[in-house]
Amino acid sequence: MPLKDSIYRTWIGLSGDPLVFPLNARIFHSVCLISIFALTYNIPFNYAIGLPKIALASLIVLLIAIALYYASRFKNQVGVSTLLANVVGLSLFIANYFLNSGLRGPTDLFFLLFLLLSIAISPAGQYKVWIPVNVMVLIILNLTEFYHPHLVPDTYTTRPNRFVDHMSAYVVVAAIAYFSIHYIRWSYEHEKMSAIEKAKAIELQNFRIVKQNEELEKLNAEKNKLMSIVAHDLRSPLASIQNFLELLTQHELDEAQKLDIENDLLNSTKNTLAMLSKLLDWSKSQLHGVSAHMEQLNLHALFEPTLNLERDIAARKNINLAYYFDPSASIYADSDMMQLILRNIVGNAIKFTPEGGHIIVKAEAREKNCLISVKDDGIGMSAGKQESIFSLNVESTFGTNNERGVGLGLMLCMEFIKAQNGRIWLESTPGQGTCFYISIPIFDKDNIHQTDLR
């Protein structure tokens, strides 16, 4: 195989790069090279069998072949060279007809070979001209010999010389014809395979473009949905805040009424702020990508401040929030992401659990992962809603105290948990509550050598 590859590369270097020269030019270069090799043999052969004039003519043709090859291959004058090759070739074969015994010699074979070569080496617009020219020249030569036989003398001195010349000419013609047709077929198959590969590459590229367009359309639809949700959900609490402030400034209210309005105003402001916070977190993840900075984190130290804060919020709805962690348990994760994930999930549990309900947060080791669960006995959700809960396709709903969200929290949780090589899923039954599960790698020495996940 190395020898074959070396020969192939050498021949490509001599005949021309397919990216630079068209097929007819490469065939022309190849024919010139073969002609040079054949004529180098033919000159001493014709001289040895007693045909010195043919030997001299072959020498002239050899020099012409070298000049034409050089001009086409290295000077890039393909059109001029092929045109001269056709003119000179026909002229030399006409001379050879008279010097090499006419119909009694092998010149008609050479005319047929030259016809094949003219078709192979000429540009598409020229070879249709050289076919009738070649045929007409040979017919005129044969008619000339038929009517004026003295113009075409018999140059063979012996019968063996005639036999050897005919056989030698036939072998040369057959070899060059075989090579030309083989080269054309090989080039055709090669370029056919190249075209198929390019078509497959274009098809793959088109497929990727279609996928990218679909993804862009999906992202654009999500953006439009998000803007619609934000516009709706921001207008409502801001209008409520405006109404509350107008009541406080324009009407005389007793202390109890003022206290109720202030509490409603506080709750509305908190909900709006929480929604804006989630929106900003999501926007940041979309603009800059999700980058997790992994480190060893003690589970109890990581989550205790967040859960104590959520416990106070739950207590306002008379909900009991309990959590149980192994004090020595460690995970390999991003601190900010994990707190945001737990805060969102626990906040949703509080939102959709009625007064007097219970929420339990637990963590346990499962092989190389830590399984964190957040279970509530709230209103639960349907199977249809569970399928879309981690996307913008989910419909935002009111909590048990009319709390409203933009629907971004769980989508953020999904993006952040994937960035930490973890998983998140849920189990829920309408009317019986929901349990969210978070699986995150446990810290071990092997994790120290891991790079941040992107």
Image (cartoon, rainbow, N blue to C red):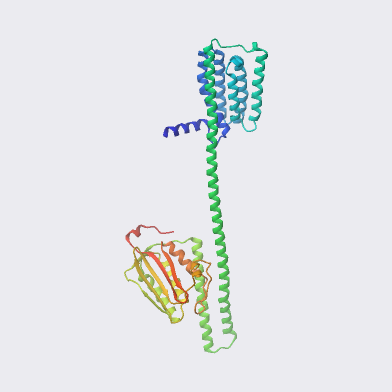
Nearest to the observer: residue 14 or residue 352 = 352
**In the depicted structure, whether residue 225 falls above or below residue 57:** below
Left/right placement of residue 72 relative to residue 319 reads right
Left/right placement of residue 36 relative to residue 368 reads right
- Quadrant, the C terminus: bottom left
- Residue 394 visible: yes
Where is residue 154? Give x, y as percent.
Answer: 59, 11
- Residue 74 visible: no
- Quadrant, the N terminus: top left
Where is residue 350? Give x, y as percent.
Answer: 45, 76
Nearest to the observer: residue 135 or residue 337 = 135
Residue most extreme to the right: 147
Q: Residue at x 66, y 15 (%)?
A: 146
Where is residue 115? Give x, y as percent.
Answer: 61, 26
Left/right placement of residue 422 relative to residue 69 reads left
| Tally of numbered discs | 0
Nearest to the observer: residue 232 or residue 127 = 127
**In the depicted structure, whether residue 46 falls above or below residue 306:** above
Where is residue 8? Give x, y as percent.
Answer: 47, 33
Q: Quadrant of residue 239?
A: bottom right
Left/right placement of residue 349 relative to residue 93 reads left
